[in-house]
Image: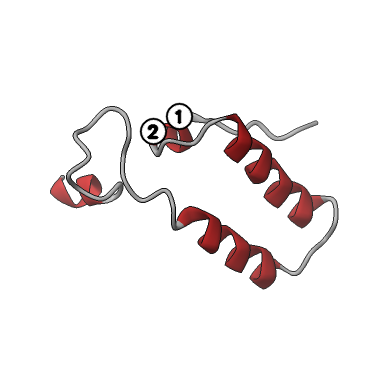
Amino acid sequence: GGIRLGTSEVTRLGMKEPEMKQIASFVKNMIVDNKEPKEVSKQIAEFRKKYQKTQYCFDNNLGAYEYVKLR
């Protein structure tokens, strides 16, 4: 068994290989290391602060998730 994670959303936000390694670390912390979910969630929230604008697919005048509101 395994977990398959897509990368389209994170690449759209401008993440690359180093960020993928960090995301893998978050997954490992939760699943393998059984770290406290609240603590890992705080780390993820801090990590995500740098990735709030779309880099691909749309013009980046709006925040990454403001496009969802336009529907």
- Of residues 65 and 62, which is closer to you in this image? 62
Q: Which three-letter amino acid code belongs to the residue tagged 2?
A: Arg
Q: Which dot marks residue 8?
A: 1
Display colour scheme: secondary structure
Residue drawn where x is 49% and y is 36% of the image: 15
Residue drawn where x is 62% and y is 36% of the image: 18
Mark 2: give few (<14), some (14-19) or many (20+) Cα within 10 Å: some
The relative height of residue 51 versus residue 12 in the rendered view (above or below) is below
Q: Which three-letter amino acid code belongs to the residue tagged 1?
A: Ser
Separation (CA) of disc 1 from disc 2: 6 Å
Residue drawn where x is 79% and y is 64% of the image: 35
Q: Position of residue 48 (x, y in %)?
A: 48, 54
Pointer 2: what residue? Answer: 12
- Of residues 9 and 18, which is closer to you in this image? 18
| Displayed quadrant of residue 47 | bottom right
Which of the two marks, 1 or 2, is nearer to us in this view? 2
Give the side of residue 34 with respect to residue 67, left or right.
right
Secondary element at image label 2: helix
Quarter of the figure with the N terminus: top right
| Displayed quadrant of residue 42 | bottom right
Q: Position of residue 50 (x, y in %)?
A: 44, 52
Callout 1 touching callout 2 (CB < 8 Å) = yes
Q: Position of residue 40 (x, y in %)?
A: 67, 63
Residue drawn where x is 22% and y is 40% of the image: 60
